[in-house]
Amino acid sequence: MFDIPVTYSSTYKPTGSKHRARAAPDPPPLFDDTSGAYSSQPGAYPAPGADVAFSVNHLLGDPVANVAMAYGSSIASHGKDMVHKELHRFVSVNKLKYFFAVDTAYVAKKLGLLVFPYTHQNWEVQSSRDVPLPPRQDLNAPDLYIPTMAFITYVLLAGMALGIQKRFSPEVLGLCASTALAWVVMEVLALLLGVYLATVHSDLSTFHLLAYSGYKYVGMILSVLTGLLFGSDGYYVALAWTSSSLMYFIVRSLRTAALAPDNVGGPAPRQRLQLYLTLGAAAFQPLIIYWLTFHLVR
């Protein structure tokens, strides 16, 4: 056998060498770690705002809640597409566009009016040449943009709440969304029947009543969101405030529409029916809001 000499490159280091390169020290952190909201010392008090920060981080960081929100978003989008498809078959698109003629300024002012309507003075819907002004030009005009967006937001918030409570499932979220929509449909049908029985001659159409009934979703969102952040006590406080504000808004809006020029000076029994119809529609709002939201806050 021939002996073959073995040569090593100048950069080769035998694996058995006792000299090893020292690991470079870790670079100093760019920012101090301030994630610890509570002190480790016994008896220490939590940092200010730690409870709220923990609640918000818990809501946003729960993977089950994120999945629930994503599924709720898909349900809401699919339902919205189906509604638009059916509306194009049975409803005049031009008439429907009136209720979606909104802008950012109108939406902001309308949300403020729904939350705090007590300082608003003039509740009459304005018109030009006997044609009602679109919502973006008249704050008192009803719209369907806010109810539609509020319904979608409610479904997403319900999915997140169910996910946080480990009770999320597609069937439960679908039942929650369909129940909220069914209550509004039944409320509109009841109002249409009441308007017919009370012989109210006004410009109130099915879309007007649907808009007024759909404004309750704004109060439902505020109640559930407050309950998730501050517990049941915050939920009941928000429920009381939003319910009273919505009742005041419904009474003033429907009462003004019912007291149109054609209805002024009518028989006393008919005016009493109109008053009962308005008060009944307003008194029914807190019951629906509570029924659709109480199971989401624990």
Image (tube, rainbow, N blue to C red):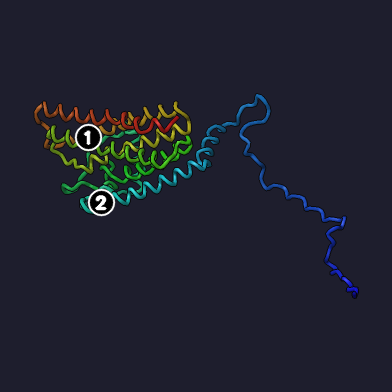
Q: Amino acid at mark 2?
A: Glu
Q: At numbered mark 2, what does the secondary structure look like: helix, strand or loop?
A: helix
- Farthest-out residue, bottom: 2
Relative height, residue 237 to residue 60 (above, below): above
- At 85% from the left and 58% from the top, the residue drawn is 16
Q: Quadrant of the N terminus?
A: bottom right
Q: Position of residue 223 (x, y in %)?
A: 40, 33
Q: Quadrant of the C terminus?
A: top left
First reached walking from the N terminus: tag 2 or tag 1 = 2
Instruction: Look at mark 2 in the image and give the residue it sits on.
Output: 86
Count numbered badges in the picture.
2
**Mark in the foreground, 2 or 1:** 2
Relative height, residue 131 to residue 193 (above, below): below
Q: Position of residue 45 (x, y in %)?
A: 62, 27
Relative height, residue 59 to residue 133 (above, below): above
Image-based side of 113 in relation to 47, left or right: left
Q: Nearer the viewer, residue 286 or 81?
A: 81
Q: Position of residue 265 (x, y in %)?
A: 10, 31
Image-based side of 23 in relation to 273, left or right: right
Q: Position of residue 211 (x, y in %)?
A: 27, 41
- At 85% from the left and 68% from the top, the residue drawn is 10
Q: At numbered mark 1, what does the secondary structure look like: helix, strand or loop?
A: helix
Instruction: Look at mark 1 in the image and give the residue it sits on.
Output: 254
- Farthest-out residue, front: 1
